[in-house]
Amino acid sequence: MNFSSPNFFILLQFLLLVSLVYHVFSFDTSFHQISNQTFQQKEKIANRLQQINKPSVKTIHSPDGDIIDCVLFQNQPAFDHPLLKGHKPSDPPERPKGYNKINILNDNFQLWSSSGESCPEGTIPIIRTTEQDILRAGSLDRFGKKSIDQVNSLAHEYVNAQFRDGGYYGGQASFNVWAPHVEYAYEFSLSQMWVVAGAGEDLSTLEVGWHVYPQLNGDNHTRLFIYWTADAYKNTGCHNLQCPGFVQTNSKIVVGGAISTTSMYNGSQFEISLMIWKDQKTDHWWLEVGPGNLIGYWPSSLFPNFKDHADRVDFGGEIINSNSKGTHTSTQMGSGHFAEEGFGKAAFIRNMELVDHNNNLNMAQNPQFLEQFPNCYDQKIGSSKEWGSYFYFGGPGRNIKCQ
Ligand SMILES: *[C@@H]1O[C@H](CO)[C@@H](O)[C@H](O)[C@H]1NC(C)=O
Ligand SMILES: *[C@@H]1O[C@H](CO)[C@@H](O)[C@H](O)[C@H]1NC(C)=O
Ligand SMILES: *[C@@H]1O[C@H](CO)[C@@H](O)[C@H](O)[C@H]1NC(C)=O
């Protein structure tokens, strides 16, 4: 072929045109498929949001960015559960006897109500779930849940006081609140109480505490949270009110809401007392935050394993170590300081008490301690008249001895 001939250029132009049209065409179809998928996904998320977010009587914009909806009590997510259709709200339970009434919590410990805003009577405050919240979870199915991978992975590290004698009808303690640094969004740092019944596939838990969990919450605020599962974290359970399970009765406290005050290193200390116990008349398990703030209950119909009593109660700290870059995380536990630093510097849990079958609170005796990586996070136990059974715990994570 003669490359200078005009025929060659005509051929070349033709080939170019064909390939151009072909590319534009194929780009166009795949673009349609992608946008159609995106569209369907968006629609699914929108449907889910409509299901989760209930009509609000009043909306409050919290300084931390949360939107708080005041939702009529009977419209709350719990009542979407088939077993709770027509559920009549339970009367307030009898408090355990010997209840320690040190008043350490004022009503305005959450940011959303610090400006004096509140929800009207007959409603409960719920954080509005946004599209971003669902996208951060990675998928609709994972939203609100601890994924099985996460639960079973070795990446969880604990420092716990464990009570494993069984026959428990509840527990309570006062938790020192901090704002630990969390290195990656998908890691967390928490301090909580676990009330546990059953084992294996039937493991059921009722959990309450404070945490910093960027992936769940979209920020680094220290927040009050609850969690529960009735099947070893498999199909049931979620954080806060993100799925039907917990019946909230309180109109002043947001489950999942940010805590406005945290402790200062070598400075003022902040603590909240948390209690979970069984109302033996109804078999519901109630939650109280600080003396006098009944939050609501886990209804008995959803927790067959808690029909009688709990088998274990644990108190402690937990972090996720994702071991990114092949080194231990620098996510802090507690205050980020080791237990030996003591009051004002290390985090503590004090006045650990357990409820017996006569509805008496007793000092929790002889804990077993779980301390997995003492070079990263450790504990120091004690007991005294004023502080009952207590321990200091925490640490900085990565350091010369913890790599
Ligand atoms: C999107 O995809 C679904 C099937 O996956 C199809 O039924 C529907 O017609 C598509 N919509 C558009 C606008 O292409
Ligand atoms: C949380 O803190 C980390 C560093 O400590 C920061 O990189 C990140 O942007 C913060 N996340 C949010 C949502 O504020
Ligand atoms: C703690 O505070 C005291 C008095 O407020 C001060 O003297 C001391 O140096 C501080 N210690 C640390 C480790 O910051």
Image: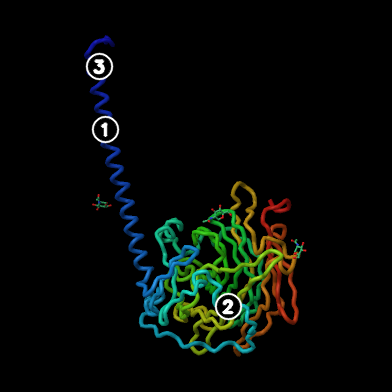
| Residue 95 spot, x, y in % from top left | 57, 87
* Residue at numbered disc 2: 106
Q: Nearer the viewer, residue 51 or 254?
A: 254
Q: Amino acid at mark 2?
A: Asn
* Label at residue 9: 3
How many marks on residues? Answer: 3
Disc 2 under 8 Å from ligand 3? The reply is no
Mark closer to the observer (3, 2): 2
| Residue 358 spot, x, y in % from top left | 60, 90
* Residue at numbered disc 1: 22
Residue at 36%, 64% (x, y): give it: 48
Few, some or many residues within 10 Å of mark 3 (<14, 14–19, 20+):
few
Q: Earlier in the sequence, mark 3 or mark 2?
A: 3
Mark closer to the observer (1, 2): 2
Q: Amino acid at mark 1?
A: Tyr
Q: Amino acid at mark 3?
A: Phe
